[in-house]
């Protein structure tokens, strides 16, 4: 039996969903993968760095506000000290995305790997801005840097290429990778105004209070950057992705396009060129015969074209924080299987 000390950096929607999933899968992890786990550290902006070597009860963390019978010690000051005190084997990082430079999360992950701790992240920033560096550090330390949940939540994209598509060369991809804008466009097609659609997206918890990161295409551009960097081997910053959001399409144009069976979608594209890659995020009218046209609500899709498989499409239906948490759990099992 392998016993893992787990640390959670970030304990919001995703971190909490991960805790619930870990609890739910405890028996299966033990019986099928010989894995036992306990949470020895949790860190958020409000809680600070908590550690308890005998294990922090997930129920206490999931209570609102968190309720501890006795307070775990909030002593450590730096991430390295916190991880050392918690004797961490794996760090699950789910802090907020910084689309400008990926910090401070990138620094946290660097610290963890330097400290000989495996890293699983749901945060796109470090992958978009520091994939090569973090991957090289993980290799040097004989640890894993895994990030399945950064694109299309828990749907297997990176593990698909890593495990099931050896020696394949990706020439281009297209997809719908931002749930919020896809949901908003659908609500406008159904007769709502842009503002009403945004409010509905906020009410069901998929849009932030400031929804501009989704609406202006930043979230999608970071995902394109991640896919291009990891799957095509061409590092591309989010600012190098040509980007146009959905603000300027106009409600009438959205409804007319749907009536003509050529709905507007916020389409992500990247294509290999002799000099590198060209990539874009922009609203496009998609013919009804294109698989992208049938993606509604919060679902997402990506279509890959490779030298060996001419077309391969992955569709994810109705994702949520649990889907994202599943990608992190799958990454944890990958670590446990290989170490
Ligand atoms: N929601 C999804 O389904 C989904 C899907 C794919 C990827 N992701 C990615 O997963 C990450 C988390 O998403 P979420 O929905 O769980 O966000 P969230 O609910 O806002 O939670 C973020 C957590 O990170 C903590 N945090 C933020 N900045 C921090 C810092 N500098 N140091 C320490 N803790 C920090 C917050 O602490 P406080 O609460 O104390 O401020 C909170 O616990 C994001 O990067 C997001 O892009 C989310």
Image (cartoon, rainbow, N blue to C red):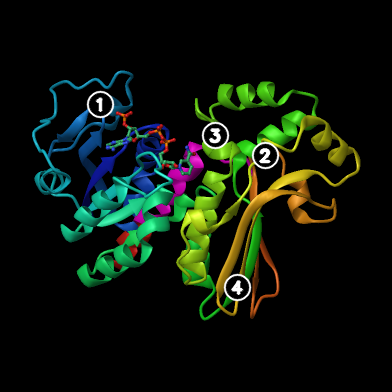
Q: Is residue 258 left or right of residue 164?
A: right
Task: Tell me the mark number nearer the camera, choosing from 1 and 2.
Answer: 2
* Tag of residue 246: 2
Mark 4 vs 1, N-terminal side: 1
Q: Is residue 328 magenta?
A: yes
Vertical placement of 308 versus 20: above or below?
below
Q: Is residue 9 magenta?
A: no
Residue identifier under label 1:
46
Indicate the secondary structure of the residue bearing disc 3. Answer: helix
Q: Position of residue 172 (x, y in %)?
A: 63, 69
Task: Say few, some or many: other residues with alpha carbon within 10 Å of mark 2 (under 14 / 14 to 19 / 20 or more).
Answer: many
Q: Is mark 4 within 8 Å of ligand 1?
A: no
* Tag of residue 272: 4
Chief SS of the magenta region: helix
**Which contiguous range is marked in magenta?**
316-332
Indicate the secondary structure of the residue bearing disc 2. Answer: loop
What residue sits 52% from the left and 81% below the top? 167
Residue identifier under label 3:
212
Q: Is mark 1 within 8 Å of ligand 1?
A: yes
- Where residue 44 sits, quadrant-wise, is top left
Q: Position of residue 9 (x, y in %)?
A: 28, 41
Instruction: Confirm or deny contact between disc 4 and disc 1 (CB under 8 A).
Output: no
- Where residue 27 sits, quadrant-wise, is top left
Q: Position of residue 126 (x, y in %)?
A: 36, 53
């Amino acid at each position: 039996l392998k016993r893992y000390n787990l640390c959670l950096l970030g304990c919001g929607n995703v971190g909490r969903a991960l805790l619930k999933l870990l609890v739910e899968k405890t028996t299966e992890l033990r019986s099928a993968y010989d894995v036992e786990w306990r949470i020895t550290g949790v860190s958020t902006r409000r809680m600070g760095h908590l550690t308890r070597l005998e294990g922090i009860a997930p129920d206490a963390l999931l209570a609102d506000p968190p309720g501890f019978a006795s307070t775990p010690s909030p002593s450590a000051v730096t991430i390295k000290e916190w991880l050392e005190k918690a004797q961490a084997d794996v760090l699950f990082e789910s802090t907020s995305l910084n689309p400008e430079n990926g910090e401070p999360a990138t620094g946290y992950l660097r610290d963890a790997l330097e400290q000989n701790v495996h890293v699983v992240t749901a945060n796109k920033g470090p992958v978009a801005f520091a994939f090569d560096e973090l991957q090289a550090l993980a290799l040097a330390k004989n640890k894993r840097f895994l990030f399945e949940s950064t694109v299309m939540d828990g749907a297997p994209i990176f593990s698909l290429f890593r495990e099931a598509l050896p020696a394949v060369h990706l020439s281009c991809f297209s997809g719908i990778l931002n749930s919020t804008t896809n949901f908003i466009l659908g609500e406008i097609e159904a007769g709502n105004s842009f503002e009403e659609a945004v409010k509905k997206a906020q009410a069901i918890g998929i849009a932030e209070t400031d929804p501009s990161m989704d609406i202006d295409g930043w979230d999608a551009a970071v995902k394109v950057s991640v896919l291009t960097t990891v799957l095509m081997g061409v590092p591309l910053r989010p600012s190098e992705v040509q980007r146009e959001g959905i603000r300027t399409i106009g409600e009438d144009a959205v409804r007319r396009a749907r009536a003509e069976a050529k709905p507007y979608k916020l389409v992500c594209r990247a294509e290999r060129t002799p000099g590198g890659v060209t990539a874009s995020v922009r609203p496009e009218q998609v013919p009804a015969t294109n698989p992208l046209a049938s993606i509604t609500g919060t679902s997402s899709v990506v279509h890959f074209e490779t030298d060996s498989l001419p077309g391969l499409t992955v569709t994810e239906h109705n994702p949520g924080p649990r889907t994202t948490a599943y990608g992190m759990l799958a990454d944890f099992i990958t670590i446990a299987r290989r170490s």
